[in-house]
Protein backbone atom coordinates (compact mmCIF):
# COMPACT_ATOMS: atom_id res chain seq x y z
CA UNK A 1 0.00 0.00 0.00
CA UNK A 2 1.21 3.50 0.71
CA UNK A 3 3.44 2.04 3.35
CA UNK A 4 6.78 3.82 3.72
CA UNK A 5 5.81 6.82 1.60
CA UNK A 6 2.11 7.35 2.23
CA UNK A 7 2.60 9.79 5.09
CA UNK A 8 5.01 12.02 3.21
CA UNK A 9 2.86 11.97 0.07
CA UNK A 10 -0.23 13.05 1.96
CA UNK A 11 1.34 16.40 2.81
CA UNK A 12 1.12 17.49 -0.81
CA UNK A 13 -2.64 17.03 -0.94
CA UNK A 14 -5.53 19.16 0.18
CA UNK A 15 -6.17 17.22 3.35
CA UNK A 16 -2.49 16.39 3.92
CA UNK A 17 -2.21 18.80 6.84
CA UNK A 18 -4.69 16.78 8.86
CA UNK A 19 -2.92 13.51 8.03
CA UNK A 20 0.43 14.99 8.92
CA UNK A 21 -0.72 15.68 12.49
CA UNK A 22 -2.95 12.73 13.24
CA UNK A 23 -2.06 10.06 10.64
CA UNK A 24 0.41 7.96 12.63
CA UNK A 25 -1.37 8.34 15.99
CA UNK A 26 -4.63 7.46 14.23
CA UNK A 27 -3.05 4.39 12.59
CA UNK A 28 -1.78 3.18 15.97
CA UNK A 29 -5.19 3.67 17.58
CA UNK A 30 -6.90 1.77 14.76
CA UNK A 31 -4.28 -1.02 14.98
CA UNK A 32 -5.02 -1.50 18.70
CA UNK A 33 -8.77 -1.39 18.06
CA UNK A 34 -8.46 -4.15 15.41
CA UNK A 35 -6.38 -6.39 17.70
CA UNK A 36 -8.78 -6.00 20.65
CA UNK A 37 -11.87 -6.62 18.49
CA UNK A 38 -10.39 -9.77 16.93
CA UNK A 39 -9.58 -11.17 20.39
CA UNK A 40 -13.12 -10.36 21.54
CA UNK A 41 -14.65 -12.00 18.45
CA UNK A 42 -12.84 -15.28 19.15
CA UNK A 43 -13.90 -15.18 22.83
CA UNK A 44 -17.55 -14.48 21.99
CA UNK A 45 -17.93 -17.03 19.18
CA UNK A 46 -16.23 -19.81 21.22
CA UNK A 47 -18.25 -18.77 24.29
CA UNK A 48 -21.46 -18.70 22.24
CA UNK A 49 -20.83 -22.23 20.96
CA UNK A 50 -20.13 -23.48 24.51
CA UNK A 51 -23.17 -21.65 25.98
CA UNK A 52 -25.34 -22.53 22.92
CA UNK A 53 -26.27 -18.86 22.53
CA UNK A 54 -26.93 -17.45 19.06
CA UNK A 55 -27.22 -13.98 20.60
CA UNK A 56 -23.64 -14.24 21.87
CA UNK A 57 -22.43 -15.58 18.51
CA UNK A 58 -24.37 -12.74 16.82
CA UNK A 59 -22.65 -10.21 19.06
CA UNK A 60 -19.31 -11.86 18.25
CA UNK A 61 -19.96 -11.69 14.51
CA UNK A 62 -21.01 -8.06 14.85
CA UNK A 63 -17.68 -7.47 16.60
CA UNK A 64 -15.89 -9.30 13.79
CA UNK A 65 -17.61 -6.96 11.33
CA UNK A 66 -16.22 -4.08 13.40
CA UNK A 67 -12.73 -5.53 13.25
CA UNK A 68 -13.05 -5.99 9.47
CA UNK A 69 -14.49 -2.47 9.16
CA UNK A 70 -11.44 -1.16 10.99
CA UNK A 71 -9.06 -3.22 8.81
CA UNK A 72 -10.78 -1.74 5.72
CA UNK A 73 -10.63 1.69 7.31
CA UNK A 74 -6.94 1.28 8.10
CA UNK A 75 -6.04 0.15 4.58
CA UNK A 76 -8.18 2.82 2.94
CA UNK A 77 -6.64 5.55 5.13
CA UNK A 78 -3.19 4.50 3.97
CA UNK A 79 -4.30 4.37 0.33
CA UNK A 80 -6.05 7.74 0.58
CA UNK A 81 -2.71 9.37 1.44
CA UNK A 82 -1.11 8.34 -1.84
CA UNK A 83 -0.33 11.24 -4.11
CA UNK A 84 -2.25 11.71 -7.35
CA UNK A 85 -0.45 10.57 -10.51
CA UNK A 86 -1.20 11.24 -14.21
CA UNK A 87 -2.82 7.79 -14.36
CA UNK A 88 -4.71 8.17 -11.04
CA UNK A 89 -5.40 11.86 -11.42
CA UNK A 90 -7.90 12.14 -8.54
CA UNK A 91 -5.59 10.32 -6.13
CA UNK A 92 -6.83 7.50 -3.90
CA UNK A 93 -9.30 9.39 -1.71
CA UNK A 94 -12.24 7.32 -2.98
CA UNK A 95 -10.66 4.13 -1.56
CA UNK A 96 -12.35 5.06 1.72
CA UNK A 97 -15.77 5.26 0.06
CA UNK A 98 -15.33 1.85 -1.58
CA UNK A 99 -14.20 0.36 1.76
CA UNK A 100 -17.21 1.78 3.59
CA UNK A 101 -19.58 0.42 0.92
CA UNK A 102 -18.04 -3.08 1.02
CA UNK A 103 -18.35 -3.02 4.79
CA UNK A 104 -22.05 -2.12 4.63
CA UNK A 105 -22.78 -4.90 2.12
CA UNK A 106 -21.06 -7.42 4.44
CA UNK A 107 -23.17 -6.21 7.36
CA UNK A 108 -26.41 -6.68 5.38
CA UNK A 109 -25.42 -10.31 4.60
CA UNK A 110 -24.51 -10.99 8.25
CA UNK A 111 -27.72 -9.52 9.65
CA UNK A 112 -29.92 -11.53 7.23
CA UNK A 113 -28.06 -14.73 8.18
CA UNK A 114 -28.50 -14.00 11.91
CA UNK A 115 -32.24 -13.39 11.46
CA UNK A 116 -32.66 -16.75 9.65
CA UNK A 117 -30.74 -18.55 12.45
CA UNK A 118 -32.84 -16.88 15.15
CA UNK A 119 -36.16 -17.66 13.44
CA UNK A 120 -35.17 -21.35 13.36
CA UNK A 121 -34.60 -21.26 17.12
CA UNK A 122 -37.84 -19.51 18.07
CA UNK A 123 -39.86 -22.73 17.69
CA UNK A 124 -37.47 -24.77 19.84
CA UNK A 125 -35.21 -22.54 22.01
CA UNK A 126 -32.20 -24.51 23.32
CA UNK A 127 -30.89 -24.40 26.89
CA UNK A 128 -28.50 -21.45 27.15
CA UNK A 129 -25.78 -20.92 29.80
CA UNK A 130 -26.93 -17.46 30.95
CA UNK A 131 -24.02 -16.79 33.34
CA UNK A 132 -21.38 -17.32 30.64
CA UNK A 133 -23.40 -15.17 28.22
CA UNK A 134 -23.54 -12.32 30.78
CA UNK A 135 -19.81 -12.53 31.56
CA UNK A 136 -18.72 -12.45 27.90
CA UNK A 137 -21.23 -9.74 26.96
CA UNK A 138 -19.93 -7.63 29.87
CA UNK A 139 -16.38 -8.06 28.57
CA UNK A 140 -17.63 -7.16 25.07
CA UNK A 141 -19.23 -3.97 26.37
CA UNK A 142 -15.90 -2.81 27.84
CA UNK A 143 -14.08 -3.60 24.59
CA UNK A 144 -16.72 -1.83 22.47
CA UNK A 145 -16.46 1.33 24.56
CA UNK A 146 -12.64 1.18 24.54
CA UNK A 147 -12.61 0.73 20.73
CA UNK A 148 -15.04 3.61 20.23
CA UNK A 149 -12.79 5.80 22.37
CA UNK A 150 -9.70 4.76 20.34
CA UNK A 151 -11.19 5.70 16.95
CA UNK A 152 -13.40 8.61 18.05
CA UNK A 153 -11.01 11.36 16.89
CA UNK A 154 -10.51 9.81 13.43
CA UNK A 155 -14.27 9.23 13.02
CA UNK A 156 -14.86 12.99 12.78
CA UNK A 157 -12.73 13.22 9.61
CA UNK A 158 -13.65 10.09 7.65
CA UNK A 159 -16.91 8.54 6.42
CA UNK A 160 -15.11 5.22 6.43
CA UNK A 161 -13.90 5.36 10.04
CA UNK A 162 -17.24 6.86 11.10
CA UNK A 163 -18.89 3.69 9.74
CA UNK A 164 -16.58 1.59 11.93
CA UNK A 165 -17.12 3.90 14.92
CA UNK A 166 -20.91 3.66 14.61
CA UNK A 167 -20.68 -0.13 14.53
CA UNK A 168 -18.82 0.02 17.82
CA UNK A 169 -21.48 2.18 19.43
CA UNK A 170 -24.16 -0.17 18.10
CA UNK A 171 -22.16 -3.09 19.50
CA UNK A 172 -22.04 -1.47 22.92
CA UNK A 173 -25.85 -1.24 22.87
CA UNK A 174 -26.14 -4.82 21.61
CA UNK A 175 -23.81 -6.04 24.39
CA UNK A 176 -26.05 -4.35 26.99
CA UNK A 177 -29.04 -6.17 25.46
CA UNK A 178 -27.17 -9.51 25.54
CA UNK A 179 -26.30 -8.93 29.23
CA UNK A 180 -30.01 -8.35 29.97
CA UNK A 181 -30.91 -11.47 27.95
CA UNK A 182 -28.30 -13.52 29.84
CA UNK A 183 -29.75 -12.25 33.13
CA UNK A 184 -33.29 -13.30 32.08
CA UNK A 185 -32.06 -16.77 31.10
CA UNK A 186 -29.96 -17.12 34.28
CA UNK A 187 -32.67 -15.85 36.66
CA UNK A 188 -35.88 -17.19 35.06
CA UNK A 189 -34.69 -19.82 32.55
CA UNK A 190 -36.34 -17.80 29.76
CA UNK A 191 -34.42 -19.31 26.82
CA UNK A 192 -36.64 -17.56 24.26
CA UNK A 193 -34.74 -14.36 25.16
CA UNK A 194 -31.79 -15.61 23.09
CA UNK A 195 -33.38 -15.91 19.62
CA UNK A 196 -35.52 -12.80 20.26
CA UNK A 197 -32.34 -10.84 21.08
CA UNK A 198 -30.64 -12.24 17.97
CA UNK A 199 -33.51 -10.91 15.82
CA UNK A 200 -33.21 -7.55 17.57
CA UNK A 201 -29.44 -7.45 16.93
CA UNK A 202 -30.06 -8.23 13.26
CA UNK A 203 -32.59 -5.38 13.07
CA UNK A 204 -30.15 -2.96 14.77
CA UNK A 205 -27.41 -3.81 12.25
CA UNK A 206 -29.78 -3.34 9.28
CA UNK A 207 -31.12 -0.06 10.68
CA UNK A 208 -27.58 1.32 10.99
CA UNK A 209 -26.71 0.26 7.45
CA UNK A 210 -29.84 1.89 6.00
CA UNK A 211 -29.00 5.13 7.86
CA UNK A 212 -25.42 5.26 6.64
CA UNK A 213 -25.23 3.66 3.20
CA UNK A 214 -27.10 6.43 1.28
CA UNK A 215 -24.35 9.10 1.22
CA UNK A 216 -21.70 6.46 0.40
CA UNK A 217 -23.82 5.11 -2.49
CA UNK A 218 -24.37 8.67 -3.79
CA UNK A 219 -20.60 9.24 -3.93
CA UNK A 220 -20.02 5.95 -5.75
CA UNK A 221 -22.74 6.81 -8.29
CA UNK A 222 -21.25 10.30 -8.89
CA UNK A 223 -24.48 11.97 -7.73
CA UNK A 224 -24.54 15.66 -6.88
CA UNK A 225 -23.30 16.42 -3.35
CA UNK A 226 -26.12 16.16 -0.75
CA UNK A 227 -27.95 19.45 -0.33
CA UNK A 228 -26.63 20.90 -3.59
CA UNK A 229 -29.04 22.66 -5.96
CA UNK A 230 -28.03 22.31 -9.64
CA UNK A 231 -30.69 24.85 -10.69
CA UNK A 232 -29.23 27.42 -8.30
CA UNK A 233 -25.70 26.76 -9.62
CA UNK A 234 -26.85 27.31 -13.23
CA UNK A 235 -28.83 30.43 -12.27
CA UNK A 236 -25.79 31.90 -10.47
CA UNK A 237 -23.51 31.17 -13.46
CA UNK A 238 -26.01 32.72 -15.91
CA UNK A 239 -26.09 35.81 -13.71
CA UNK A 240 -22.35 36.42 -14.13
CA UNK A 241 -21.32 39.43 -16.20
CA UNK A 242 -20.45 38.39 -19.77
CA UNK A 243 -22.28 35.01 -19.59
CA UNK A 244 -25.17 34.55 -22.03
CA UNK A 245 -26.00 30.97 -21.05
CA UNK A 246 -24.95 27.93 -19.03
CA UNK A 247 -25.72 24.27 -19.71
CA UNK A 248 -24.27 20.74 -19.56
CA UNK A 249 -23.80 21.01 -15.79
CA UNK A 250 -22.46 17.97 -13.93
CA UNK A 251 -21.93 18.02 -10.15
CA UNK A 252 -20.31 15.16 -8.25
CA UNK A 253 -18.17 14.32 -5.23
CA UNK A 254 -14.58 13.19 -5.73
CA UNK A 255 -14.50 12.05 -2.09
CA UNK A 256 -15.95 13.10 1.25
CA UNK A 257 -14.14 16.45 1.29
CA UNK A 258 -13.95 17.45 -2.41
CA UNK A 259 -16.78 18.36 -4.78
CA UNK A 260 -16.33 18.87 -8.53
CA UNK A 261 -18.27 20.42 -11.41
CA UNK A 262 -18.08 20.63 -15.19
CA UNK A 263 -20.19 23.10 -17.19
CA UNK A 264 -20.46 24.82 -20.58
CA UNK A 265 -20.76 28.63 -20.58
CA UNK A 266 -21.92 30.63 -23.60
CA UNK A 267 -19.81 33.84 -23.70
CA UNK A 268 -20.47 36.40 -26.51
CA UNK A 269 -17.40 38.56 -25.75
CA UNK A 270 -13.73 37.79 -26.20
CA UNK A 271 -12.73 38.02 -22.53
CA UNK A 272 -12.98 34.31 -21.84
CA UNK A 273 -10.31 34.27 -19.14
CA UNK A 274 -11.94 36.75 -16.75
CA UNK A 275 -15.35 35.02 -17.18
CA UNK A 276 -13.79 31.63 -16.39
CA UNK A 277 -12.00 33.05 -13.34
CA UNK A 278 -15.21 34.69 -12.10
CA UNK A 279 -17.16 31.43 -12.61
CA UNK A 280 -14.56 29.37 -10.69
CA UNK A 281 -14.49 31.93 -7.87
CA UNK A 282 -18.31 31.87 -7.67
CA UNK A 283 -18.44 28.04 -7.56
CA UNK A 284 -15.81 27.90 -4.80
CA UNK A 285 -17.25 30.75 -2.74
CA UNK A 286 -21.00 30.08 -2.95
CA UNK A 287 -21.18 26.32 -3.53
CA UNK A 288 -17.99 24.86 -2.02
CA UNK A 289 -16.85 23.48 -5.40
CA UNK A 290 -13.08 23.90 -5.70
CA UNK A 291 -12.55 21.57 -8.66
CA UNK A 292 -14.34 23.02 -11.70
CA UNK A 293 -13.83 22.37 -15.41
CA UNK A 294 -15.42 25.10 -17.53
CA UNK A 295 -15.82 24.96 -21.30
CA UNK A 296 -16.44 28.37 -22.88
CA UNK A 297 -18.11 28.68 -26.29
CA UNK A 298 -19.31 31.63 -28.42
CA UNK A 299 -23.06 31.79 -29.20
CA UNK A 300 -22.57 30.85 -32.88
CA UNK A 301 -20.69 27.67 -31.92
CA UNK A 302 -23.73 26.62 -29.93
CA UNK A 303 -26.60 27.16 -32.41
CA UNK A 304 -29.03 25.35 -30.13
CA UNK A 305 -27.84 27.16 -26.97
CA UNK A 306 -31.38 28.10 -25.92
CA UNK A 307 -32.62 24.59 -26.55
CA UNK A 308 -29.54 23.20 -24.77
CA UNK A 309 -30.17 25.43 -21.81
CA UNK A 310 -33.59 23.86 -21.34
CA UNK A 311 -32.94 20.26 -22.35
CA UNK A 312 -29.40 19.79 -21.15
CA UNK A 313 -29.96 21.46 -17.79
CA UNK A 314 -32.55 18.83 -17.11
CA UNK A 315 -30.21 16.10 -18.41
CA UNK A 316 -27.31 17.40 -16.34
CA UNK A 317 -29.24 17.29 -13.09
CA UNK A 318 -29.76 13.58 -13.37
CA UNK A 319 -26.01 13.15 -13.09
Image (cartoon, rainbow, N blue to C red):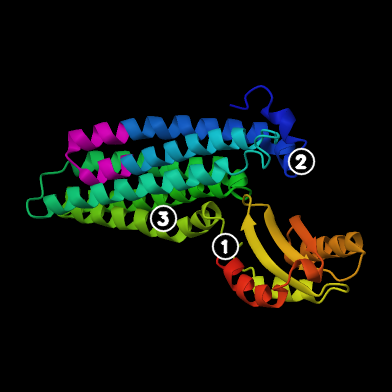
Q: Which mark is residue 209?
A: 3
> Could you give the CA–CA distance between mark 3 and mark 2, rounded to whole angstroms?
31 Å
Q: Residues within 10 Å of mark 3 (few under 14, many from 20)?
A: many
For the record, the magenta segment spans: 43-60
Say which element carries label 2.
helix
Residue occupying the point 40% across, 44% down: 141
Q: Which mark is residue 254?
A: none
Say which element carries label 1.
loop
Of callouts 1 and 2, the N-terminal one: 2
Left or right, residue 34 beside residue 53:
right
Q: Outermost residue, top direction?
A: 4
Q: Residues within 10 Å of mark 2 (few under 14, many from 20)?
A: few
**Of residues 286 and 278, the one drawn nearer to the viewer in this rendering:** 278
Which residue has dot 1 on it?
319
Percent from the top left, x then y, of residue 17?
Answer: 76, 41
Which residue has dot 2 on it?
17
Magenta includes 45? yes
Of callouts 3 and 2, the N-terminal one: 2
Q: Quadrant of residue 139?
A: top left
Q: Quadrant of residue 68?
A: top left
> Could you give the CA–CA distance between mark 1 and mark 2, rounded to whole angstroms?
32 Å
Magenta includes 224? no
Percent from the top left, x then y, of residue 200?
Answer: 28, 57
Q: Are marks 1 and 2 in contact (CB under 8 Å)?
A: no
**Of residues 282 and 315, the one drawn nearer to the viewer in this rendering:** 315
**Most prominent secondary structure in the magenta stretch?**
helix
The quadrant in which the N terminus is found is top right
Amino acid sequence: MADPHGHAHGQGKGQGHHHHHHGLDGDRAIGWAVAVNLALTVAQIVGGLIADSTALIADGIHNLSDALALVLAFGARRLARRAATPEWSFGWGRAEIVAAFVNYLALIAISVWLAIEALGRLADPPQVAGGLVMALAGFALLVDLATAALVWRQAKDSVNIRAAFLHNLADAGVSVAVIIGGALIWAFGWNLADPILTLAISAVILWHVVQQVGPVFRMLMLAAPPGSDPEAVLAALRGLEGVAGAHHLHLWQIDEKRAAASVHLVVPGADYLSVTRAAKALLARDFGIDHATIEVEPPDACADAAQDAAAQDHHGHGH
